[in-house]
Image (spheres, rainbow, N blue to C red):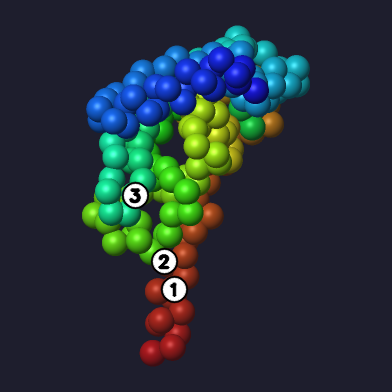
Amino acid sequence: MASQAATAVATVVRSVAAERQEQVSVHYGAAELPRLAALVEEAAKDAAGGEVIAPDVCAVLAFSEHEAPSFVAVSVQIKGVYTLPCQRCLELVAVNVKIDQQLAVGDGLDGTVLEALEADFEQWDLEGDSLALVELVDELVMLDLPLVVAHATLEDCGPLATQLAGDDVAAVSQRPFAGLQALMADNDKQDN
């Protein structure tokens, strides 16, 4: 959880940036992103090997005020890296974070009003009258977690993946519908 000082700073940065339509760059590590840090730490305990990379995230947030409807537009670009275990070999793999999102921040925004705007905005309801940047970045990174973490190719995986795949690595990358076109052609011939 962010300290009160960090929240207060984020509130001041937000209000100043919104008034001047400025851009703010922030850097957060494991201390500022406790949910992601806990996930990485817990996953590392069960990993078969690999180097642990603690969460390291840089975010650029650009603010602009919109009049009708009244909201603050926040353009968010987040880049970073952390490690989680590969689902095939259980060794740690670096997960790259790359988020580019437009947020409409305000109280009681109506989704239909936002749909009428030309830009694609994701609605972000404001709790209270401040926006804690660390909480915003933390939430966006957590929402961006991959469903399946794996090395890019089977060859990049550790020995467990190769062992489970057996000697025939091609069997792992079978295409289950490869023969479907031939079966459909045969079926069409039988119908005619």
Task: Give the spatial CA distance, label 3 vs label 2.
Answer: 54 Å
Q: Residue at x 29, y 30 (%)?
A: 19
Q: Position of residue 114 (x, y in %)?
A: 35, 57
Label 2 amino acid?
Gln
Q: Position of residue 28 (x, y in %)?
A: 50, 16
Q: Residue at x 55, y 29 (%)?
A: 135
Number of residues whose C-alpha sits closer than 10 Å to that of mark 3, classed few (under 14), some (14–19) or many (20 or more): few
Q: Return the residue found at the far bottom.
A: 192
Q: Which residue is mark 3?
A: 70
Please identify, in this view, whether the residue under mark 3 or under mark 2 is nearer the observer.
3
- Helix, strand or loop at label 2? It is helix
Q: Residue at x 55, y 41 (%)?
A: 127
Q: Which residue is mark 1?
A: 184
Q: Residue at x 61, y 13 (%)?
A: 31
Label 1 amino acid?
Met
Q: Is residue 60 left or right of residue 3?
A: left
Q: Is residue 14 left or right of residue 108?
A: left
Do the numbered discs 1 and 2 sit on residues whose CB atoms are within 8 Å?
A: yes
In the displayed structure, 10 sits above or below 128; it is: above
Circle on res. 181: 2
